[in-house]
Image: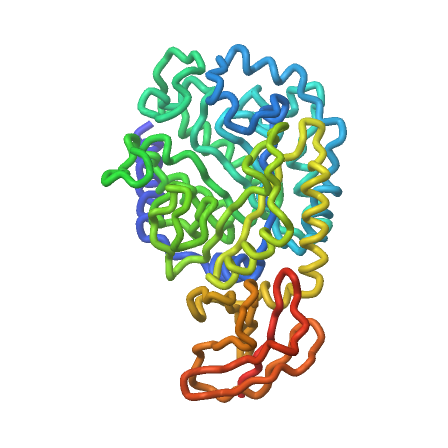
Amino acid sequence: MIRVQCFLLLSFFSLSLSAQTYQPTPANIQARKHFQDNRFGLFVHWGVSSMLGSGEWVMQNRNIKVKDYARLKETFYPSQFNAAEWVTAAKNAGMKYIVFISRHHDGFSNWDTKQSDWKITNTPYGKDVLKMLADECKKQGIQLGLYYSTLDWFREDYPYTSGRTGQGTGRKTGGNYDSYLQFMKAQLTELLTNYGDIMSIWFDGHWDQTNPEGSADRSSRIDWKYNEIYSLIHQLQPQCLIGNNHHLDPIPGEDFQMFEKDLPGQNHTGLSFQKPSDQLPLETCETMNNSWGYNITDHAYKSTRQIIHYLVKAAALNTNLLLNVGPMPNGKIQPENLDTLKQVGTWMAKYAPTIQSTFGNILPAQDWGVITARENIHYIHLLNPQQKPFIFIPLAGKKLKKAVLFSKGKPVNFKQVPEGIFLYTEEMEMDPIDTVIELNWQ
């Protein structure tokens, strides 16, 4: 017994030390570069909450008791779920990865977990959708990341009494984080053992145990023991990237930084007070209407132009765009979303080289648009119509060899001065979404 206790103590110490002194492996560093080159991914919010057609927060928003919410398991039957359709839609849109909700705040697991009966394989549908999705992603060459909620409105052992949400779901015990932590670690072990290579674990829910965003004190009311959680993930799959939607600066052990419905440096939502990292890859997530999960009355769909502009502006800030869909209860992605994804894909089929495998932060956004780049090439994205017959680009240094309209290769007249470049646009054929000019430098 003493030997076992000593072994466990040494193991715990090793996990703690490895997180505090986290050095990403070469495979992880390579994965970060690949992730950044991807630039564009599909977020999928879906589960039993989709049945109520009121978004993924419906359990919290309506204070639905656990005993009532659990009945959804008896009728969830996504008969038209087709992993190939989801993956094909993402791939045809020019996306390189999918982040799928493995478990949201209502605690429902979208895979055949052995840690809980509250799971999709206990519904009348009975199938492991994550297994089908993972197999299809591998088949089509799309990377798979997994969203995982650290917050739970359903389980008794989650420490809900100190949380900001989940107070109205009828729980009685007050929580037990030691038990809950072991549950999460066991589930994460399943996800990282049984479903092949996982690109990323996308955590969410930390903010439940903090004061609201913007408060002077955002410290957590519980010790999440991320050193143990992050070390476990990196031991199981060293290349797997860890991100956490805590709306804070990155914590040691994390491999990318995320922003929710904001571009880095912006804070329209009141969630993004954190500074963009200059060390980690960045990602922003955004919805196609105003909802994450399926909302039957939300018809505020963003236009193709709006989404492409968001993607281009993100790339100009060295940031990925994770664009969300909330499939219907039957497993189908809404036709409105599919139509838009198809149109975005038509644009990406032509302009992907100006987005993917490029880098940003060349110049702050200008009144005419933004810039992306690769070695010796700058892509000028003219997003906003200009009254003047020219634009000025304040880039000085190397000599400009030529300027061409990216879509057709036609020369663009320019004049280089010590302060930058004048590009003359009066005779150019302008694109209604984004006119891209390619600058080639000597």
Figure quadrant of the N terminus: top left
The x, y position of residue 195, in whole percent, is 62, 41
Taking 335 as reference, is 22 above or below it?
below
Taking 2 as reference, is 138 above or below it?
below
As drawn, is 162 to the left or to the right of 373? left
Taking 325 as reference, is 26 above or below it?
below
Residue at figure coordinates x 57%, y 82% from the top left: 440
The x, y position of residue 311, in whole percent, is 56, 56
As drawn, is 143 to the left or to the right of 11? right
Q: Residue furthest front?
A: 387
Between residue 253 and residue 309, name the one nearer to us: 309
The x, y position of residue 155, in whole percent, is 46, 20
Residue at figure coordinates x 32%, y 43% from the top left: 16
Between residue 372 and residue 225, name the one nearer to us: 372
Residue 18 seen in the figure: no
User: How many marks are shown on the rendered structure?
Assistant: 0
The x, y position of residue 146, in whole percent, is 55, 41
Residue at figure coordinates x 60%, y 74% from the top left: 437
Taking 442 as reference, is 26 above or below it?
above
